[in-house]
Amino acid sequence: MHTPSRRTLLRAPFAAAGAGLLAACTDSGSHPHPSPRRGAAAGAGDFVPPGPKGYVEPAGPEVRAAERKRGSGPVRMLKLTAAETTLDLGGRHVRTWAYHDQLPGPLVRVTAGDVLSLNLANRLPTTTTLHSHGVRMRCDMDGVPSLTQRAIDAGDDFTYRFTVAHPGTYFLHSHVGLQPDRGLYAPLIVDDP
């Protein structure tokens, strides 16, 4: 009888998500890979990618208007804590990282049109981020380090806040190195109202 490896078990949710969801996280603008610079955009901390003439600031009026079109439902305030833990993988106990000491992490469930305010507490010995895979959202909440945000330092928290407009099943995961392979992922379900 074949026994799947830990890596196989940890990667199964990624295979199920499909490569097509990646397209929802990209931008069709002329600067697909802007380099980081510091700026003063409200809500984006001090991380704002540069852009060509006419560039739209992540917290500018155009972005706020687009967010209003996505919905203005109730604010769903949730918290995830990324930390070192020991997990039971079918009788084998392994030291790894996870959200709330479970694999996958806890279910995040909202309704389309809700504003998700998701605080990520980083209790890891290194930086991390949280990417909402396949969810269309404002760029500065996308969780890609050195592209859409600065990585969250060890011991710090960051609140991702955006309107979730499209129903579906998605997943949240770290976007730093091989952290998802260690167990930093969780399901996100957006119910159709």
Image (cartoon, grey):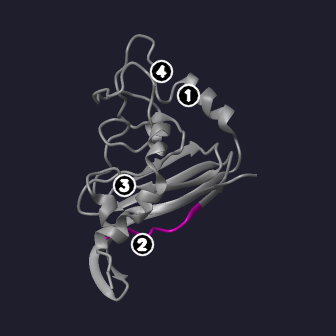
Which residue sits at x=44%, y=62%?
Answer: 13
Q: Quadrant of residue 125?
A: bottom left
Residue under pointer 2: 103
Which residue sits at x=46%, y=34%?
Answer: 139
Instruction: Work out how far the residue at label 1 is from the one at label 3, CA to CA, in angstroms.
Output: 24 Å
Look at the numbered discs 1 and 3 and tell me whether their residues touch, using CB distance below 8 Å: no
When the figure is inspected, residue 175 is found, relative to residue 63, above or below; the finding is: below
Residue 146 or residue 103, whichever sits in front: 103
For label 3, the crowd category at 10 Å Cα-Cα, with few meaning under 14, some 14 to 19 and many 20 or more, is: many
When the figure is inspected, residue 88 is found, relative to residue 164, above or below; the finding is: below
Instruction: Work out how far the residue at label 3 is from the one at label 2, CA to CA, in angstroms.
Output: 14 Å
Label 3 or label 4, whichever comes before in sequence order: 4
State which quarter of the image contains the N terminus: bottom left
Instruction: Assign a secondary structure to mark 1.
Output: helix
The secondary structure that most of the magenta stretch takes on is loop
Which residue sits at x=61%, y=29%?
Answer: 66
Label 3 or label 2, whichever comes before in sequence order: 2
Look at the numbered discs 1 and 4 and tell me whether their residues touch, using CB distance below 8 Å: yes
Instruction: Assign a secondary structure to mark 3.
Output: loop
Residue range highlighted in magenta = 97-108
Residue under pointer 4: 56
Residue 124 as seen in the image, left or right of residue 62: left
Residue under pointer 1: 63
Estimate the x, y position of residue 158 in percent, counting from the top left: 42, 50
